[in-house]
Image: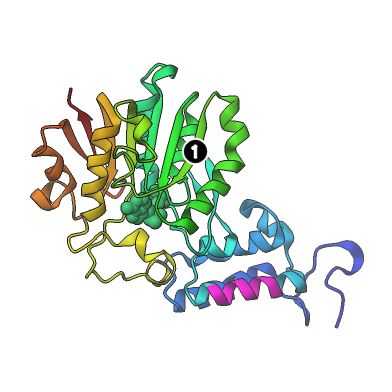
Amino acid sequence: MTSPTSGGGRPDRVVEGWQSLRDVLADAQRRLMAAGVPSPEVDASLMAAHVLGVPRGRLYLQDPMPNDQRMAFERLLSRRVARVPLQHLLGSAPFRTIELSVGPGVFVPRPETELVAGAAIDALRALPAADRIAVDLCTGSGAIAIALAAEVGGVSVTAVEVDPAAARWARTNAERYAEEVSVSGGSVRVIEADATRCAAPGGPLAELVGTAAVVVMNPPYVPDGAVVRDPEVREHDPARALYGGPDGLRVIRGAIDTAAVLLRAGGQVVIEHSDEQGDKAGELGVPGLLRVDSRWRDVVDHLDLARRPRFTTATRTA
Ligand SMILES: C[S@@+](CC[C@H](N)C(=O)[O-])C[C@H]1O[C@@H](n2cnc3c(N)ncnc32)[C@H](O)[C@@H]1O
């Protein structure tokens, strides 16, 4: 066995106990693909970057992969092959401009929700700073709430989450960004409460009744009987984050009532829904629910980047 770095130059061959990063990644991609992981190349390189402590774009500078890191990589890879979510393995998930700590007990924020947060951000930016009062119902990791406060100056966000474990993740994430948010005059507070009841008299959000400019939500919306295909979702996202009653709309209906109570006249609600709960779903869709309700006007359904119905916006009537 020869040293892979003899002479101080780059190794010119793989020797026992060492393996080039390129080979490690190629083997990992094959195993991830065989396990049905949808993005084997990205996942393999992100896990390698994680164990090597370098940005993904600088991975090939680390060639070959030292043994210790190769073992750490192998441990991550075998869990990913077993379909543990990549974000749980890395301990974090990107969301717009922020990075959120995630793990067991909390829903992993999704790229499509970035658009939902974007609609709330646009609505807040259009307002004078003093009016920037927002509520994120069903906050999970705090993704939407913290994104609003990180991207819009002076916004005061209340984030509501019913699940104690998820609320702990949200608090951890809010604390991580607290200083940055407070410098811009904003704040994020996490309240452990039921989004369908929190604005009732005596409830934890009663003081916000009629004051919010924006209420945004990504609630659970999968019908109880629906089969969730991806093991990462089915086995690792909490059931409470996914299932929304027999028609998927149980939490949404209650949270819409809460939004109507919290918003001031002219305030905006932004609601994420499944691609089957858009305009075509009629009364079983989110725009359908709002259109027959005199508390709302200017109901618009929006598509995601894959051109699928993804979220609804509406304005609170006077
Ligand atoms: C689909 S996840 C969305 C999490 C986060 N907003 C996001 O976009 O990543 C839904 C979240 O709503 C929470 N939840 C479910 N029912 C709720 C209720 N009645 N009140 C408050 N939160 C609820 C779940 O625990 C879960 O964290």
Query: Please, is residue 291 above or below residue 52 in the view?
Result: above
- Determine if the magenta segment contains residue 95: no
Q: Residue at x 28, y 30 (%)?
A: 263
Q: Residue at x 53, y 53 (%)?
A: 168
Residue 60 or 146: which is nearer the viewer? 146
Q: How many marks?
A: 1
- Across and down, in percent, residue 179 comes to 62, 33
Residue 114 or 250: which is nearer the viewer? 250
Q: Which residue is mark 1?
A: 189
Q: Residue at x 22, y 63 (%)?
A: 223
Is 49 placed left or right of 126 in the picture? right
Q: How is the image coloured?
A: rainbow
Magenta stretch, overall SS = helix
Q: Residue at x 74, y 68 (%)?
A: 64
Q: Does mark 1 have its CB less than 8 Å from ligand 1?
A: no
- Across and down, in percent, residue 219 comes to 32, 51
The quarter of the picture where the N terminus appears is bottom right
Is 64 placed left or right of 167 in the picture? right
- Across and down, in percent, residue 99 comes to 55, 46
- As drawn, the residue found furthest toward the right would be 7
- The answer to whether residue 142 shows anywhere in this view is yes
Query: Please, is residue 131 above or below residue 217 in the view?
Result: above
Magenta segment, which residues? 71-79
Residue 256 or 126: which is nearer the viewer? 256
The quarter of the picture where the C terminus appears is top left
Query: Residue 274: which quarter of the image?
Result: bottom left
Query: Local crowd at mark 1 within 10 Å, few (<14), some, or many (≥20)?
Result: some
Q: Secondary structure at mark 1?
A: strand
Is 130 placed left or right of 76 in the picture? left
Which residue type does callout 1 highlight?
A: Arg
Query: Residue 44: which quarter of the image?
Result: bottom right
- The answer to whether residue 23 shows anywhere in this view is no
